[in-house]
Amino acid sequence: MNKDQVNGRAQSLKGGVKEAAGKAVGNERLTAQGKAEQAAGKVQSKVGDVKNDVGNAVKNAIDR
């Protein structure tokens, strides 16, 4: 795992906690912030996945 994958998944998890807390206390703003953080975390995690895939492809091409 690379830094983007770890940070993205952590941000997504944090967003999930915020969303749940917002729903629990009836705070729509906190719920929305949680959803936004989850989305941003998923994007960052996906960027990390792509970086990892590209790195693996380059490594495989070099090994051939």
Image (tube, grey):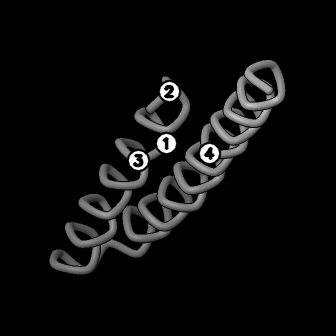
Q: Secondary structure at mark 3?
A: helix
Q: Is residue 64 left or right of residue 27?
A: right
Among numbered discs 1 and 2, the one appearing first in the sequence: 2
Q: Is residue 53 left or right of residue 33?
A: right
Dot 4 and dot 2 residues touching (CB under 8 Å): no
Q: In the image, which disc is placed on residue 63?
A: none
Dot 1 and dot 2 residues touching (CB under 8 Å): no
Look at 41% across and 35% down and name the residue there.
6
Q: How many marks?
A: 4
Which of the two residues, 59 or 30, is positioned nearer the viewer here? 59
Residue position marked by numbered label 4 in the rendering: 49
Residue position marked by numbered label 3 in the rendering: 9
Q: Secondary structure at mark 4?
A: helix
Q: Quadrant of residue 13?
A: bottom left
Among numbered discs 4 and 2, the one appearing first in the sequence: 2
Q: CA distance from mark 4 to mark 3?
A: 11 Å
Q: Quadrant of residue 30?
A: bottom left
Residue 5 lies, with reference to residue 59, above or below; the image says below
Mark 1 crowd level (few <14, some 14–19, many ≥20, 10 Å Cα): many
Residue 39 in the image: state x and y as whole percent. 58, 61
Q: CA distance from mark 1 to mark 4?
A: 10 Å
Look at 81% across and 19% down and name the residue there.
62
Q: CA distance from mark 3 to mark 1?
A: 4 Å
Q: In the image, which disc is placed on residue 8?
A: 1
Q: In the image, which disc is placed on residue 2?
A: 2
Q: Secondary structure at mark 2?
A: loop
Q: Assign the C terminus to one quadrant of the image.
A: top right
Among numbered discs 1 and 4, the one appearing first in the sequence: 1
Mark 3 crowd level (few <14, some 14–19, many ≥20, 10 Å Cα): many
Residue 27 lies, with reference to residue 16, above or below; the image says below
Residue 36 in the image: state x and y as whole percent. 56, 60
